[in-house]
Image (cartoon, helix red, strand yellow):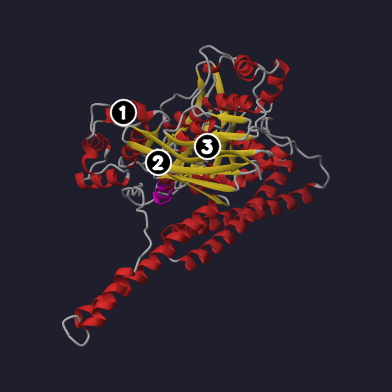
Amino acid sequence: MPVLIELVDGHKAYGGRVVLADASVSITDTMKVGVVGRNGAGKSTLCRILVGEEEADGGELRRSTSLRLGYLRQHDPFLPGETALQFLLRDSGQPEWRCGEVAARFEVKGERLAAPLDSLSGGWRTRVKLAALLLHEPNLLVLDEPTNFLDLRTQLLLQGFLAGFRGAALVVSHDRGFLRAVCDHTLEVSRGGLILEPGDIDAWMERASERRLHAERVNAAVEAKRRQLQRFIDSNRANASTATQAKSKAKQMARLEGIEITGDERRAVIRVPEIGEPRRGPALRCDDLAIGYGDRRVADDIRVEVEHGQRVAVVGDNGEGKTTFLRTVAGSLPPLAGAARWGHGCRTGLYAQHVYSSLPGERTVIQHLHHAAADGLKTQDLLDIAGAFLFSGDDVEKPISVLSGGERARLALAGLLVGGHNVLILDEPGNHLDVETLESLAAALRTYHSTMLFTSHDRAFVAAIATAVVEVRSGRVTTYPGDWQNYLWRVQREIDDGQRGTAPPRSAPAAAATSTPAAAGRRAWELQKRSASAEKRIAQYEAERDRLDAALADCQDTAAAEALHRDRERARERLERATAEWMEAQEELGRAGP
């Protein structure tokens, strides 16, 4: 297969910090490569070197004469006041009709195509950048965090495009679900080196785990042999008749070599304080709620009920009103009509998208945690929490003003989790967090005895913790039965059927009367029984799934983990069948009318 681009012995440093050291990689014309690594490992630097925006300090960059690069940057390349159409014309040099045609593939048309880019949300600006990239007709796509700010529908559109793209792609992403869906190779950037392996992200993680286990076993065997030889040497070197054997054993021991295991990079292991016994019953009830700003209604006629202990993912396309809904139920935005009522004893805590940027810069890390903490938490408790969020030693005395965006986001979350809240409202908690920290946060939230409403563009995070889904779309707020996987399946089916983009129906049309009132009554009674039975089984299977998730999180034995995973898959399948049965019964009841 022809090589499109190759880096040989690349070296890059910023001051005294080495990002790449003798790093080499080759990308052929059909490879789809997922790039993984910790924040600051050098993933974006590698992209900039490959596309020519930055030069390596050493090594050689070789490009095929047939190479046509398409580069999606993290940062916006727009001019002040420039509209989407003006940018596409300037960037691509293509005629207006062609720019409009490609932009429409990402639904950038009409008012959005003519709007100044600085008036669009981050998600819509990313769509414009994707359209610009495709206008260059590349055979190698370099995508640096392409799913940032993208709603689910656009993620699925991009995912489908990349899966069918005939050229090569290099994709930097913290979204492992996205990498799993589109990439057939994995490139790890770590400690200045590049390691390219065939297989998707799951295969890479499995091999990395196997290599470590193998190294640990070899080292354990080597250490046992050393102890055995040392005992022989200690017992026999003073004895004239066995001194020669002891010397031989010493030489043998010197030749024993283990396998170097590179120390794990420091990562968050989040633990949260206990908040008392879990509560039962309704936590939130929205009655005829209308949300919006001033004269602008975002959604109305909202009737949503959340039970204590539910973890509700609030989903929807960019600009549909997810944040507006969360702010309204949190009490930071007044409702336009109706009410959002919290149950007795609910103590709500809000994490807003940009809360990390408003933390008081003069406070230190530990001072902020003291300020945010609930009564009864001691300084050592707060130091333990700080350490879990990667603030240890002298770090806790750092003023907030010197912290990076990622460090501030971690501190804001730590402050929220020590606040003694039994209801958490989280608006994009994953922004600025690396994959490992986000995974640790998800694991902690699964065991936190609180009610949650949250929104996130990271599908792996949503799938890990959501037990229910509420969608904000086209002026409606709709509760979907089942978990995130069930919702994702429904959305994909609607996209395949061309139904996405239309508003969800306010009510199903009544079916024409085709039976006697008595027969209709019997049928309704049967459907209600079937619905109630399915609903009971849904609760049972959800509890079983959550129990197995918790067991998997704590399991250290490979064979036991495999058995738990099989049980979890069976529970998921049973849950999907019960949910489908409930939905069918509800749809038929809706068609039958009251």
Disc 1 marks which amino acid?
Answer: Leu
- Dot 3: what SS? strand
Nearer to us in this view, 325 or 252: 252
Q: Residue at x 65, y 31 (%)?
A: 138
The local crowd at label 2, few if under 14, some if 14 to 19, many if 20 or more residues have their Cα within 10 Å, is many
- Amino acid type of the residue that numbered disc 2 sits on in the rendered structure: Val
In the picture, measured across the screen, residue 198 lies left or right of residue 375, that is: right
* The residue stretch that appears in magenta: 440-449
Which dot, 2 or 1, sits closer to the camera? Answer: 1
Q: CA distance from mark 2 to mark 1?
A: 21 Å
Residue type at mark 3 is: Val
Q: Give the labeled residue for mark 1.
A: 359
Reading the image, the residue beneath label 2 is 423
- Nearest to N terminus: mark 2 or mark 3: 3
Residue with the mark numbered 3: 314
x and y percentages locating residue 99 in the rendered image: 68, 20
Residue 266 percent location from the top left of the image: 34, 47
**Which label is found at residue 17?**
none
Which of the two discs, 1 and 3, sits closer to the camera?
Answer: 1
Determine crowd level at label 3: few under 14, some 14-19, many 20+ residues with C-alpha closer than 10 A.
Answer: many
Q: Quadrant of residue 344?
A: top left
Magenta portion: prevailing SS class: helix
CB-based contact (under 8 Å), mark 2 and mark 3: no
Which residue is at 32% across, 50% downward?
A: 274
- Going from N to C along the chain, the mark reached first, 2 or 1, is 1
